[in-house]
């Protein structure tokens, strides 16, 4: 029960991170938001690590580094597939694959076993993932094979991150997450640095790389699905440049907190259960968009939110 509660709460925190990152990406390039979030999340995890105790072995750190590389791959694939569109299909597909891959790993490879209500809960959770991730207002078009492959790849990379972190020892504390965040931060800052140097060499201002020059895809710092889970016709909120930097920083702290909750949930329970509930992260984004931006929640999304609660209760009893 504790594991399911931690995973479901972690999903809501993931959604809040996505919401903050999405607002920041209205002013800053998504890659820049990712880099800033990686740095602020790293600081938060490094501060929390001594407070929570534990020390990672060489193997734990290696798993964390691998997780950081995989998360960058997820981000890259996510950017690519969302650029191709349509988000209304590719976003839920990414979320479903990110849940199914570690679910199958837990059940088939790790030998996890659930009560019958648990298996039913997994099915309900997958339906909820699709409904909650639905993007109202977007015209439905047929996705390309390339877009579908990239969306599935992004989902597999996100699921792989969960599998990788699940391999770390309970005695390692948050050390694997610190290593993961440091790795992804180094990679993303390196990419931003290369873009800045390229801009300067061609005579452009360095700040041209930092600010958006095209519609934001709303990609998130951990490679989960986009931020565009809002109803059509909603008022677009574009923060000031200074506020955007702060939003990106807070996004990273929230994302780090969600990662910590996910790690605790994995150490308390089953990978299959945690992965199914973590994939419900769009619920947090939807609820914050409704509360803060007064955006309308579609009826199908309310149904998904209700099923998410039902799935959480069923998996808590599993």
Image (cartoon, grey):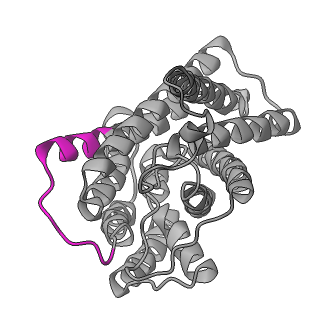
Image quarter for residue 229? Answer: bottom left
- The x and y percentages for residue 51 are 88, 38
The front one of 110 and 96 is 96
Query: Measuring 63% from the left and 49% from the top, which residue is drawn there?
Result: 255
Residue 110 as seen in the image, left or right of residue 205: left
Residue 232 image point, x, y percent:
37, 80
Q: Is residue 152 something one can see in this rendering?
A: yes
In the displayed structure, 154 sits above or below 293; it is: above
On the image, which quarter does residue 131 sit in?
Answer: bottom left
The front one of 156 and 166 is 156
Q: Nearer the viewer, residue 200 or 267?
A: 200
Is 279 above or below relative to 135?
above
Quarter of the image where the N terminus is located: bottom right
Asked whether residue 127 is drawn in magenta, I would say no
Say which residue appears at 58% left-offset and 62% top-offset: 23
Which region shows up in magenta? Answer: 136-153
| Count of numbered circles on the image | 0
Q: How far across and down, in percent of the image, does residue 283 sit? A: 49, 69
Looking at the image, is 229 positioned above or below residue 7? Answer: below
Where is residue 196? Give x, y as percent: 57, 27
Q: Is residue 219 left or right of residue 40?
A: left
315 lies above or below 313:
above
Q: In the orientation shown, which residue stands out farthest toward the top?
A: 58
| Position of residue 24 in the picture relative to residue 47 (left or right) | left
Seen from this angle, which residue lies furthest front? 203
Q: Name the foreground residue: 178 vs 171.
A: 178
Q: Is residue 107 visible?
A: no
């Amino acid at each position: 029960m504790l594991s399911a509660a931690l995973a479901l709460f972690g999903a809501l925190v993931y959604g809040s991170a996505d919401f903050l990152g999405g607002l920041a990406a209205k002013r800053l390039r998504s890659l820049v938001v990712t880099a800033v979030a990686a740095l602020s999340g790293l600081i938060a995890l490094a501060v929390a690590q001594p407070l929570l105790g534990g020390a990672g072995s060489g193997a734990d750190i290696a798993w964390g580094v691998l997780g950081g590389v995989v998360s960058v791959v997820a981000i890259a694939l996510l950017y690519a597939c969302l650029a191709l569109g349509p988000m209304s299909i590719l976003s839920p597909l990414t979320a479903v694959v990110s849940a199914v891959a570690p679910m199958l790993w837990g059940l088939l490879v790790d030998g996890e076993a659930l009560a019958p209500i648990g298996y039913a809960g997994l099915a309900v959770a997958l339906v909820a993932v699709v409904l909650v991730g639905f993007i109202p207002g977007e015209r439905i078009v047929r996705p390309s094979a390339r877009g579908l492959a990239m969306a599935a790849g992004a989902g597999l990379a996100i699921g792989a991150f969960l599998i990788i972190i699940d391999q770390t020892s309970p005695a390692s504390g948050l050390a694997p997450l610190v290593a993961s965040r440091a790795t992804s931060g180094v990679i993303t800052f390196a990419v931003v640095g290369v873009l800045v140097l390229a801009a300067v060499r061609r005579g452009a201002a360095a700040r041209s790389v930092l600010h958006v020059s095209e519609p934001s895809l709303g990609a998130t710092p951990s490679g989960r699905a986009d931020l565009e889970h809002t109803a059509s016709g909603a008022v677009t909120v574009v923060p000031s440049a200074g506020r955007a930097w702060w939003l990106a920083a807070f996004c990273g702290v929230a994302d780090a907190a969600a990662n910590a909750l996910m790690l605790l949930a994995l150490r308390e329970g089953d990978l299959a259960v945690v992965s199914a509930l973590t994939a419900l992260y769009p619920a947090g984004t939807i609820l914050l968009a409704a509360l803060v931006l007064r955006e309308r929640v579609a009826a199908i999304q309310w149904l998904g939110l209700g099923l998410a609660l039902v799935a959480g209760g069923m998996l808590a009893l599993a």
